[in-house]
Image (cartoon, rainbow, N blue to C red):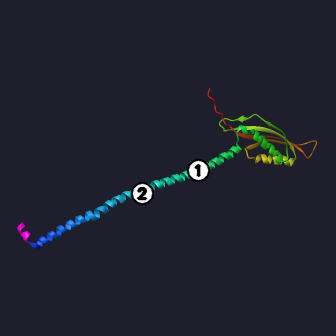
Amino acid sequence: MNLEDLKENKAYQIVAGVIAAYIVCTVMFYFIAIAPKVSMSSELKAKIVEKQSFLLKAGSMEKQREKIEEAKVKIEKLKENISYYEKKLPTEKDIPDLLQYLSNIATSADVTLLEIEKKQEVRQEQTLYVTVPFKLILKGGYHNIGSFVSKLENADRFMKIEYLKVEEDKKNPFEHMGEIMVYTYILDVLEPQENE
C-alpha cells in the first residue's frame, strides 16, 4: 500500500483523523486540565511543607515555653529557700536584731535577761558561716526558764544550746538563776576588696 492508495482509502483517512484528534485532545486536556493541577499540587506540597515546618517550630517553642515556666517555678522555689535561709542564717549586721529577738523571747517566757555577753566568734575553714556564742544570764521561775529554752530551740534562726545551768535563788525559792551558752550562726560574707 503506497501513499496514493492511502489517500484514496477513505476509511483509513477517517481512522487516522480520529487518532490525530485523540492525540490533540489528550495533549490539550493535559495542558488545560492536568498541568495546572500538577502545578497547584506542587504549590500545595510546598505550602504543606512550610506549614509542617511552622508547626514543628511552634511545637518547639511550646516546649521551650514549658521549660521557661518550669524554670520560673524553680526560681520562685529557690527564692523561697534563700529567704528561709536568710532568716535562719543572717549576716553580721543582723546581730542587733538577734539581741532584740532574745529579749523578746525572754519577755514572752516571763524571764528577765540580766546579761547577754557575746563571746569570740569562731570561723572554720571551708564553711559559709561563722559560729557566734552568747552567754546569757537570766532570772525567772523554773518552768519559765524551761519555756525560754524551748523557744530558743524552736527559734526562726539556727541556734544551738551548748550549756545550761539552773540554780535556785537563795533569797527566793520560786526564782531561779540560769546561765545558758547559746551558739548562733551568721553568714560569712566577704566584704569586697577596694583597689589600692
Q: Is any part of residue 121 visible from this angle?
A: yes
Within-10-Å neighbours for mark 1: few <14, some 14–19, many 20+? few
Q: Give the residue at x 62% y 47%.
A: 78
Examine the structure image and report whether residue 71 is included in the region drawn in magenta. no
Judging by the rendered image, the residue that carries numbered circle 1 is 72
User: x%, y% of residue 11?
Assistant: 11, 73
Q: Give the residue at x 20% y 65%.
A: 24
Residue 29 lies, with reference to residue 49, above or below; the image says: below
Evaluate if marks 2 and 1 touch, with contact meaning CB atoms under 8 Å apart.
Answer: no
The kind of secondary structure element at disc 1 is: helix
Residue 74 lies, with reference to residue 96, above or below; the image says: below
User: x%, y% of residue 134?
Assistant: 78, 38
* For discs 2 and 1, the disc positioned in front in the rendered view: 2
Nearer to the camera, 144 or 79: 79
Kind of residue indicated by mark 2: Lys
Q: Quadrant of the N terminus?
A: bottom left
Q: Which mark is residue 176?
A: none
Q: Quadrant of the C terminus?
A: top right
- State the predominant SS element of the stretch in magenta: helix
Kind of residue indicated by mark 1: Lys
Residue 14 lies, with reference to residue 82, above or below; the image says: below
Q: Is any part of residue 2 visible from this angle?
A: no
Examine the structure image and report whether residue 4 is included in the region drawn in magenta. yes
Within-10-Å neighbours for mark 2: few <14, some 14–19, many 20+? few
Question: Magenta part of the protein: which range?
Answer: 3-8
Which badge, 2 or 1, comes first in the chain's sequence? 2
Judging by the rendered image, the residue that carries numbered circle 2 is 51
Q: CA distance from mark 2 to mark 1?
A: 31 Å
